Image: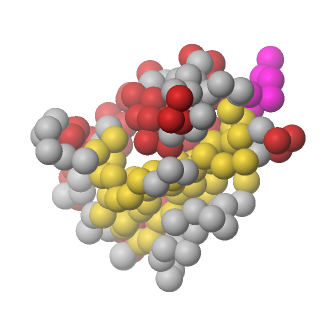
Amino acid sequence: MPNEFTLATAVVLPAQSAVTHLYKGVNLADAFAIRLPPGASSDPDLLARFIFSHQPSWVRKLMGVRDAIVARFGLKTGKHLEALASDPNADRVGIFKVYSTSQTETVLGEDDKHLDFRVSVLCSSGPADGRQLTISTVVHCHNLLGRAYLLVIAPFHRLVVKASLRRAARIGWLPAVQSDA
């Protein structure tokens, strides 16, 4: 049974997020939030790394199917992006390039020939004097291939984000450190 700290809910894009007004034309914009328990880290970079390194096992299988399809269109695959992440000089969180990091937000994403996207991991004040973690995604398509891709992938994207937040909460968030509190 979900409790207040394991329930991931759809929310509006946070006004304070760097991705909210990033693109002039947005083909997808969504956000999901989860409450952070007392004592959990509020470092968005650490939280992003934690979430994306503890994905549900079915996400990797789904990515394998996605890669097999998109490779035929010359799009970047997860394997290609994982290879980039293995470079010690690469600033990446899993398969995602890090575009910016602040005390409250880390912005990740990737640009490809069919679309560009950004993912915000934002830690902010939440309900009842608590804190919440919000993952926002914005996508800008360049062409028909991007729009068709997004039409197919969007429902899975939403499932993955919510499941990833719930899984991280069930595992247990990283504890805050002195400079993080």
Q: Which residue is drawn at 24% across and 57% down?
A: 75
Q: Residue at x 80, y 29 (%)?
A: 4
In which quadrant of the rendered image does the C terminus lie?
top right
> Toward the viewer: 79 or 123?
123
Q: Residue at x 86, y 41 (%)?
A: 128
Q: In which quarter of the image is residue 115?
A: bottom left
Horizontal and vertical percent for residue 2? Answer: 78, 23
| Residue 28 visible in the shown view | no
| Residues in magenta, as a range | 1-9
In the shown orientation, is residue 119 left or right of residue 41?
Answer: left
In the shown orientation, is residue 84 left or right of residue 112?
Answer: left
| Residue 134 visible in the shown view | yes
Check the image and name the residue furthest to the bottom. Answer: 24
Q: Quadrant of residue 140?
A: bottom left
Horizontal and vertical percent for residue 133? Answer: 63, 42
> Toward the viewer: 175 or 153?
175
Horizontal and vertical percent for residue 41? Answer: 56, 31
In which quadrant of the rendered image does the N terminus lie?
top right
Most frequent secondary structure within the magenta stretch: loop
Q: Which residue is drawn at 71% across and 27% down?
A: 37
The answer to whether residue 95 is above or below residue 53 is: below
Horizontal and vertical percent for residue 12? Answer: 72, 60
Check the image and name the residue furthest to the right. Answer: 128
Q: Is 175 covered by the magenta stretch?
A: no
The answer to whether residue 126 is above or below residue 75 is: above
Identify the colour scheme used: secondary structure
> Toward the viewer: 127 or 156?
127
In the shown orientation, is residue 107 left or right of residue 5?
Answer: left
